[in-house]
Each structure stands twice: as C-alpha cells, then as structure tokens.
Image: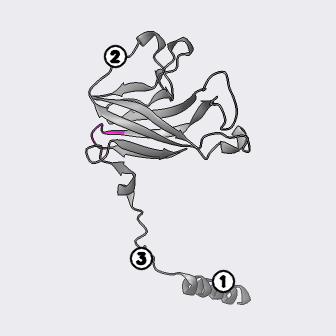
Amino acid sequence: MIYKLLISNLFFISLINCQTQKVAQNTSTDITKNVVDVKSENLIYLKEGETKFIKELQANITFVGITEDSRCPEGVNCIWAGAATANLTVMTTTSRPMQMQLSTVDMPSRKLIKANNIGDFHVILDKVSPYPNQKINKSELKGKYEIVLKMEKGNIKVDQSSDPVTTK
C-alpha cells in the first residue's frame, strides 16, 4: 500500500511540474546588417572573424585573419615599408569555399598581390588596421585587426603562376 501511495504521489508531483511549451520570444537578430550592397558603397569593412554577404557577388566573404604583418611600426626607421596579408574565405552561391590572400602591396617575387577577381568584380585590400607601433607588440593585435576591401566592377589580369587562391 505504501508503495502505491508513493508511486501515485510521484506521478502527481511530476504531472504538476509539467508545463506546456512556452511561446518563444522574438529573438531574431538583425541579419541584414551583415549584407552589403556594393552599389551604395564600394567599401566593405570586416573585423577579424567576421563574415558579410555581398549581394552583387552572391557571395560570403569571411576575414579569417592576418597571416603576415611585416609593416614597419610607426616611429621606426625600416629598410622597407613591409606588408600585411589578409586571409579571406570566399564562397559564392555556386562555388566551394576558396581561400584568398590579399596583401597591402603587390610583390610577385614574394607572391603578394593586392587585388583578385571574384565573379565580375575585383577585390582590392585597401586598408589594414591597426597600424603597428613601437608600444604594441604585434602578437597583442591578433583578433583585433580590421580590413577595408574595395570592390570594383570589372576584372583585372591576375598572374596565374602566383595565384594565392585555393579551394577547400
């Protein structure tokens, strides 16, 4: 008898604690802020790790990170100005993801290019910030980089022997 009473009490307690499914609150984020219209502005601003969808290209561009930053720090006399190289992942609606590396300078001898083609546009690495200085160690900048890409209608000739685009 005690067991029946105990089991029935557990059943009722469980039943009392059951709740109907709650209505989900509208928690949708503003996805449109990551959609860029190149017609209205030809500059695309990306933070490290950020992805944006480009309407005209029908492509996502992800700024993966900086693979090289040999730019001469402010306030230092250097032999050459150096270069910063951004690693991008580009995926159109009709292609596989492609790794693309764009640099702040064109230097074919080091396989550094400033611009490359995506569809009917060419993409130019316009700016990398922050610019290194004497006070900040470059390792402290990891994850804090921002780039500006310039999108222009038309294609440029890219030397295929030093093409830094690879597919996954």
| Mark 1 crowd level (few <14, some 14–19, many ≥20, 10 Å Cα) | few
The picture places residue 97, in percent across and down from the top left corner, at 43, 31
Task: Report the residue marked by disc 2.
Answer: 157
Mark 2 and mark 3: Cα distance apart in space: 55 Å
The amino acid beneath tag 3 is Val
Task: Report the residue marked by disc 3.
Answer: 23
Residue at 60% of width from left, 40% of height from top? Answer: 131
Rendered view: 3 above or below 115? below
Task: Report the residue marked by disc 1.
Answer: 7
Name the quadrant containing residue 53: top left
Residue at 42% of width from left, 38% of height from top? Answer: 149
Q: Is residue 108 left or right of residue 74?
A: left
Closest to the observer, 21 or 90: 90
Q: Earlier in the sequence, mark 2 or mark 1?
A: 1
Q: Is residue 18 left or right of residue 51?
A: right
The amino acid beneath tag 1 is Ile
Residue at 41% of width from left, 26% of height from top? Answer: 115
Rendered view: 131 above or below 78? below
Closest to the observer, 51 or 93: 51
Span colored in magenta? 55-59
The disc placed on residue 27 is none
Rendered view: 136 above or below 25? above
Residue at 38% of width from left, 56% of height from top? Answer: 33
SS label for mark 3: loop
Name the quadrant containing residue 96: top left
The picture places residue 126, in percent across and down from the top left corner, at 44, 35
Q: Earlier in the sequence, mark 3 or mark 1?
A: 1
